[in-house]
Image (cartoon, rainbow, N blue to C red):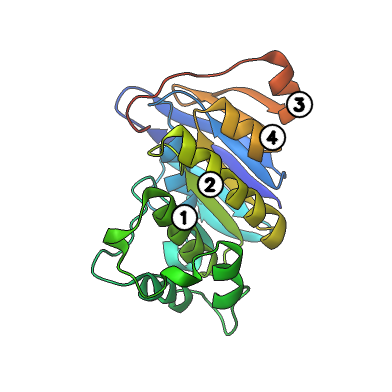
Amino acid sequence: MKLLLRRISLPLADFVLEVDVELQSQVTAIFGASGAGKTSLLDLIAGLRQPASALIQLEERVLTDTARAEALPPRSRQIGYVPQDLALFPHLSVRQNLLYGQKRAPGEGSLFSFEHVAGVLEIGPLAGRGVTGLSGGEKQRVALARALLTSPKLLLLDEPLASLDEALKAKIIPYLLRVREEFRVPMLYVSHDRREVQALCDEVLELARGKVIRRASREAWRANGNGVTDQGAASQ
């Protein structure tokens, strides 16, 4: 994967998000305390927020270029986004939520079949159930499956385990590892949990008040021992 995030500038309430990097790892952690600007960066990539300036390019496709007044709409970006609130449709069944993801897939064919995704994430038996009756871990897997069924070129995961207790986190991490190895879709993984980052990510981009304060491989980052223990509110 090659993701260019050049001359990114987005004014927020207390600071300006400013990023200028090129990412090539399969799974990159966007790491930092709550309020560091992590979610805002994902929103820019997904096309959900408009920057003051930015060049965002995924492989050879320009997603946003403010210098040329170009911006693809979110549904045309081939990006799967799992937000913190999961955004599942409560009035639809699990199957209907997943099929909604498939319908949004651009082009003629899907990268992954319904059966393949449901099998890897072990949600086939849940297909006929309503989402409101699912456990937290089941909802996470359904949201991830729906994102995969959009045939994404990039997955954005915004603190997907933040609402789960430690026991559930331990159960969901193997599913995320399975998705990483089975589907090979590049991911940006927002977190402020060191253990998740060490388990899942190849590279760490650390933010503080909208600025990149550190970039390191997982090994170098682990050896340094830095981490954030903040378990507070969602990032800006």
CB within 8 Å, label 4 to label 3: no
The amino acid type found where label 2 is placed reads Ile
Q: Work out how far the residue at label 3 is from the one at label 2, CA to CA, in angstroms.
A: 23 Å
Compare marks 1 and 4 and give the one earlier in the sequence.
1
Label 1 vs label 3: CA separation?
A: 27 Å
Residue bearing mark 1: 81
In the image, residue 64 lies at what x, y percent? 51, 54
From the image, which quarter does the C terminus lie in?
top left
Label 4 or label 3, whichever lies nearer to me, is 3
Q: Secondary structure at mark 4?
A: strand
Disc number for residue 172:
2
Per the image, label 2 sits on a secondary structure element best described as: helix
Q: Residues under labels 4 and 3: Cα distance?
A: 8 Å
* Amino acid marked by disc 3: Glu
Q: Which mark is residue 203?
A: 4
Find the distance from the CA under tag 1 to the CA under tag 2.
Answer: 17 Å
Q: Which mark is residue 219?
A: 3
